[in-house]
Amino acid sequence: MKPGLALRVSQHLTLTPQLQQSIRLLQLSTLEMAQEVEQMLADNPFLERADDEDATTDGAGERAAQAGADGDTEDGADDPALTTPAHGGDEPAVPDTVALLESATPAAPDDWPTPADADAGTGGADDAFVPDDTDWSWDGPGVDRDGRQADEEHGSAAELARSTERLQDHLHRQALALHLDDDERAALYFLIESLDDDGYLSDSLEDLTAALWRHVQAADPTAGEARQEEVASLMRRALGWLQAMEPAGVGARHLAECLRLQILEQPNTPEARAALALCEQPIEWIARRDMRRLAQATGLDDAALRAGLALLTRLEPKPGRRFADAERQIIVPDVIVTVQGAQFDVQLNPAVLPRLRVSDLYAQALRGLRGGDLQQRLQEARWFIKNLQQRFDTILRVARAIVERQRSFFLHGEVGMRPLVLRDIADELGLHESTISRVTTAKYMATPFGTFELKYFFGSSLGTDAGGNASSTAVRALIKQMIAAEDPRKPLSDSQLADLLKEQGIECARRTVAKYREALRIPTASLRKTL
């Protein structure tokens, strides 16, 4: 085979580190983004918080005067992507990163520097973009025109999450009021830490006692049977102390015991005695409200059964609910929508916006140097701020487009929701559908009707008699209204709900009604029936 030279033309995509970071930041939730910012602040010495208002203002004035003297007008301050969107004006043009990946272009945009530029010492990243590093500082839309930080009292999402007390901490504080010796306190501590998020002991007392006994043996190998019996007695007493704590029902092993503990905290009335008798019966009978079996098993008359069942429905089946996983339940909206008449104001939430800038001290020290690891870290800091701003710009653009499409929702509530799919917003904004999916995932909007994930405003459509479409969200709201207005003694079946929707011109099959009802966590007609 004879060797030779040949020319070949081909196209390929270059996924730069900046593009990867832009995509990753776009799909992060508020809490995840806060963690990313903290990690970047810890790793990159050139990145710092822009909290010193006086220093920032003075430095900006000096640099503006210097820029005017040098006649330099092609710096990053005139870059539209660095304009704060919350202050009004034209919205910045944000590159659609997913469209760049999925298109057939040979490389990323020409004005995006690569690490090779810095290593080669060409200066393309620094000279073409930002001769002055302070132009990369970004206070975010949370700063008003006078430079003051808005809504400082809100705090960060992580701080809000940490402010909620855990169930175990709540119980440990109550345990401090008990006069216990060291062994008793250790047994009670062991039980409290064994509770699940709902406040139940998911393991049996025997298994928990065996686990504690293994710890005792590990600490004292000479412990004998007498010590083992003492540990078992301690655990039984500790269970009693735990189940006497607040919230009532904590420390139960199953639902019937949880309900019984709560009933015992109430006055000894005929209603409470009937409820106690019901707790001794299979829980399935109570769930189905099988009056015949319950009457035969308890010997209670119809009036007593109804009173006992009414008391059971008022009890809390999960005593640890208000403490459970409080950190993950904290929702900090990314966008805030206010309605004034027929006008909507859509702004980013100042509480989630980081105030970052490139350290002027380090940047000035490196000015004039080319190449090297430090220069690359400086470039990374600049691009991190740039990508953060692109993230919030994209979220704001998508949120404004959603509000414009769902104006009826903000005026009339859920029943006014219109059919909307991701492609509608993607086509309107000139972005890729995958970008819209990333933006609307784990991002929340605060509205006069509550806080919703951005995906909530998207829904499939159902046909109507008039030839139009109705949003599935609006149909669910109608089903919820119909059930709320039904006669509790004769609740509406799924077929009846489908017929009522048809009377309003909405074609919805019975199975679709059942699916929407289950999504709303509404039980079947038999379980909704009031005796």
Image (cartoon, helix red, strand yellow):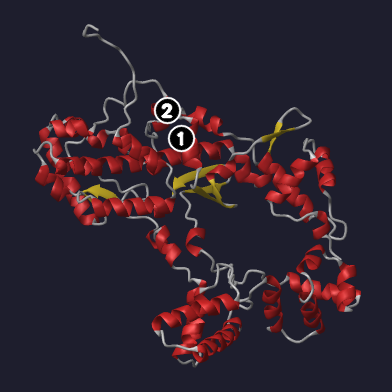
Q: In the rendered image of this protein, does residue 404 appear above or below residue 46?
A: above
**Nearer to me, 376 or 483:** 376
Amino acid on which the number 2 mark rests in the picture: Ala
Residue at position x 81%, y 67% in the image: 285
Q: Residues within 10 Å of mark 2 (few under 14, many from 20)?
A: some
Residue wearing tag 1: 435
Amino acid on which the number 1 mark rests in the picture: Thr
Residue at position x 33%, y 20% in the image: 106
Query: Which quadrant of the figure contains the C terminus?
Result: bottom right
User: Looking at the image, do the residues carrying marks 1 and 2 touch, with CB atoms under 8 Å apart?
Assistant: yes
Left or right of residue 304: residue 221:
left
The residue sitting at the top extreme is 2
Question: Does residue 48 appear in this view?
Answer: no
**Nearer to me, 55 or 24:** 24
Question: Residue 281: percent from the left, percent from the top?
Answer: 79, 73
Question: Residue 309: percent from the left, percent from the top?
Answer: 80, 72
Left or right of residue 371: residue 435:
right
Residue at position x 42%, y 26% in the image: 102
Q: In the rendered image of this protein, does residue 459 appear above or below residue 177?
A: above
Query: Which quadrant of the figure contains the N terminus?
Result: top left
The quadrant holding residue 255 is bottom right
Could you tell which of marks 1 and 2 lies nearer the N-terminus?
2
Residue wearing tag 2: 99
C-alpha span from label 1 to label 2: 8 Å
Residue at position x 29%, y 43% in the image: 384
**Nearer to me, 203 or 420:** 203
Label 1 residue SS: helix
Question: Residue 202: percent from the left, percent from the top?
Answer: 59, 70
